[in-house]
């Protein structure tokens, strides 16, 4: 029997259930919630970057391009690689990385760039 | 003479076991080799050369390099000269430095992506052989992709800083590697900036594509399927295997292809690309899509851009 935990997103106040065998992003998406940006669901693209504020969890391997070892120790992770072991309180830091790198907001001046 | 087609792609994966399960059981490729460093080589059933995908375990996702096959060994000498003359440094790679491949040229496109050219790769034959072949072999797994079809590379694009690596890489492919432009997206005042291009060196609508973004990267590599029915079945296979699908079966306005975008377990985007779209020809007029029709250009049915299309890549 899988156990279910409550996941709380700081920015949007959204709350949803996630089982211990499911990653947080997949649980969020399957409930139709949108608080964490959703991309590859494989730990490769970095858009779902979060800070875990409270709770215990396991992680799977994530791209070092987006989460350094130091960050990982501080509780930063990619939501699609985080499996809860208790209720979780998290804050979103990923937004859309490519826009962050551009140092502008998400204003698109040329088509989709 | 000249470039024949895309021949292989080397992708970085976070977990080899999960990656193999995806490329074997979902796409239906066959593992043909593991080298001493643990890189795994895979082949699709309708390909006759030894492999088309190399998976390398790494701490990040993305593409290491891409390889194109040329027709004759002597082409490599000509290309070495013309690439060097263009101002791009070329490295000679000895035979078998890339396993099962003869001597090669290695260089970086103006966008920064690493490319190999070579004339020889070990021949192993398709899954049905060459004498009285069946239309398809027994025992194909998953989607049963036919071959690696094309790749789309993200190139740095920032007109305010006069950076357009899409245009630069496109020009290089045309001027030096003898590709031709098939379709393009133009943006900005009077469509003065090439934001995306689709280029062919054969008769398929594209053998490579470039799209502009804030940073360079790997957008997707596509595998060929025959028909719309095969694309639907591939989507069923993905649903059964809990593959993360980015865009469900749909038609691209560009190339008219039948598409599914999905991710491998490390977040590298794959595509199954069905149908020939049309027969590309060197004298076929170039198709141009304007900024106000971007949505339909990429996703013809909804006519709406999907945010992840340009913001999510590895
Ligand atoms: S969605 Fe791509 S890293 Fe999580
Ligand atoms: Fe494609």
Image (tube, grey):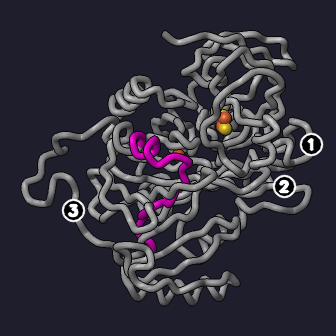
Vertical position of residue B297 compared to residue B88: above or below: above
- Residue bearing mark 3: B125
Kind of element beneath mark 3: loop
- Residue bearing mark 1: A104
Q: Tell me where residue B26 appears, x and y as whole percent.
A: 38, 37
Q: Is mark 2 within 8 Å of ligand 1?
A: no
For this orientation, the residue located farthest to the left is B132
Asked whether residue B197 is in view, the answer is no
Q: Tell me where residue B46 appears, x and y as whole percent.
A: 27, 52
Quarter of the rendering containing residue B144? top left
Q: Are discs 1 and 2 located on one and the same chain?
A: no
Q: Chain of mark 1?
A: A
- Find the distance from the CA under tag 1 to the CA under tag 3: 51 Å
In front here: A76 or B222?
Answer: A76
Write the residue at 19% across / 40% down: B139
Asked whether residue B127 is in view, the answer is yes
**Which stretch is magenta?**
B1-22
Q: Nearer the viewer, mark 1 or mark 2?
A: 1
In front here: B189 or B130?
Answer: B130
Kind of element beneath mark 1: loop
Q: In terms of sequence position, does the residue under pointer 2 or pointer 3 come before the other?
A: 3
Q: Nearer the viewer, mark 2 or mark 3?
A: 3
* Residue B18 lies in the magenta-colored region: yes
Badge number at residue B158:
2
């Amino acid at each position: 029997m899988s156990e279910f935990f409550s996941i709380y997103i700081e920015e949007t106040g959204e709350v949803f259930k996630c089982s211990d065998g499911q990653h947080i992003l997949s649980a969020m998406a399957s409930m139709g919630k949108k608080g964490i940006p959703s991309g590859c669901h494989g730990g490769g693209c970095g858009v779902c970057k979060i800070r875990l504020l409270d709770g215990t969890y396991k992680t799977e391997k994530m791209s070092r391009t987006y989460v350094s070892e130091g960050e990982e120790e501080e509780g930063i992770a990619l939501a699609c690689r985080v499996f809860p072991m208790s209720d979780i309180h998290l804050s979103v830091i990923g937004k859309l990385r490519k826009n962050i790198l551009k140092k502008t907001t998400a204003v698109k001046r040329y088509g989709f760039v | 003479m000249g470039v024949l087609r895309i021949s292989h792609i080397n992708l970085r994966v976070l977990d080899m076991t999960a990656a193999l399960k995806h490329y074997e059981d979902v796409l239906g490729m066959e593992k043909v080799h593991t080298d001493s460093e643990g890189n795994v080589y895979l082949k699709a059933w309708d390909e006759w050369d030894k492999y088309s995908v190399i998976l390398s375990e790494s701490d990040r996702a993305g593409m290491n390099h891409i390889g194109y096959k040329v027709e004759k060994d002597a082409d490599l000498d000509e290309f070495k000269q013309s690439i060097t003359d263009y101002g791009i440094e070329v490295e000679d790679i000895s035979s078998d430095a890339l396993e099962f491949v003869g001597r090669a040229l290695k260089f970086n496109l103006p966008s920064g992506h690493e490319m190999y050219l070579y004339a020889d790769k070990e021949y192993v034959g398709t899954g049905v052989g060459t004498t009285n072949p069946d239309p398809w072999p027994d025992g194909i797994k998953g989607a049963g992709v036919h071959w690696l079809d094309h790749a789309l590379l993200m190139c740095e694009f920032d007109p305010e800083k006069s950076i357009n690596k899409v245009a630069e890489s496109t020009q290089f492919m045309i001027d030096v590697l003898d590709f031709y432009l098939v379709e393009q997206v133009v943006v900005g005042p009077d469509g003065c900036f090439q934001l995306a291009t689709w280029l062919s060196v054969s008769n398929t609508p594209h053998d490579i594509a470039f799209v502009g973004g804030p940073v360079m990267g790997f957008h997707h590599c596509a595998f060929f399927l025959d028909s719309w029915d095969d694309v639907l079945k591939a989507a069923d296979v993905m649903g059964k295997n809990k593959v993360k699908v980015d865009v469900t079966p749909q038609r691209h306005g560009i190339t008219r292809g039948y598409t599914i975008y999905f991710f491998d377990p490390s977040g590298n985007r794959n595509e199954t690309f069905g149908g020939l779209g049309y027969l590309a020809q060197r004298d076929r007029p170039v198709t141009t899509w304007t900024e106000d029709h971007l949505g339909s250009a990429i996703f013809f049915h909804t006519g709406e851009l999907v945010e992840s299309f340009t913001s999510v890549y590895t």
